[in-house]
Image (tube, rainbow, N blue to C red):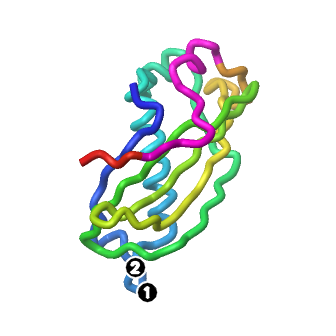
Amino acid sequence: MPSVYFHRLTVSSKDIDEQGHVNNLEYLRWMQDAAVAHSAAQGWNAQRYRAQGSGWVVRSHHIEYLQPAFAGDQIMVVTWVAGFRKVRSLRKYQIHRSHDQALLASAETDWAYIGLERRVPRRIPQELIDSFDVVTDPIIEFPP
């Protein structure tokens, strides 16, 4: 079970904006997709959350764009859980271009755990917390 998760994707032409590079909203989609995939890899897929009557919602995103990405680029979204609080979790991301490992963006999302029935915050269960390693200063070694 990976503490630091690597999510691969290829930039498609539909991801490109009027300026000829990846639209800023695509980075957010990539972040969410990587978070969902990491959670599933840790045993917490959508079905398990539904069975618990719970899920995650975004409280805030912070993203710093450093370099553009273009159609055809192979991208690696690197993500990890940086901390848990009573009803919140901080997840961090680095978005790299695969061929040269250039850092395109760094980001974080503050997630809130909620009950799905009433849509109110709920304490994160210990079994969920125990499924993830908290990583404060990751050493990122890119897979081949």
Q: Quadrant of residue 86?
A: top right
Q: Quadrant of residue 84?
A: top right
Q: Tell me the kind of residue under disc 2.
A: His
Q: Is residue 105 left or right of residue 87?
A: left
Residue 38 in picture, x, y percent from top left: 43, 35
Residue appearing at x 38%, y 28% in the figure = 41
Give the residues in magenta.
125-140
Question: In this orientation, which residue lies closer to the viewer: 34 or 79?
Answer: 79
Q: Tell me the kind of residue under disc 1.
A: Gln
Q: Is residue 55 left or right of residue 83?
A: left
Residue 104 in picture, x, y percent from top left: 46, 67
Evaluate if marks 2 and 1 touch, with contact meaning CB atoms under 8 Å apart. yes
Magenta stretch, main secondary structure class: loop
Residue appearing at x 38%, y 73% in the figure = 69
Question: In this orientation, which residue lies closer to the viewer: 120 or 142?
Answer: 142
Query: In the current view of this chain or complex, which residue is farthest to the bottom?
Result: 19
In the figure, 91 relative to 102: above or below?
A: above
Q: Which mark is residue 19?
A: 1
Mark 2 highlights which residue? 21
SS at circle 2: loop
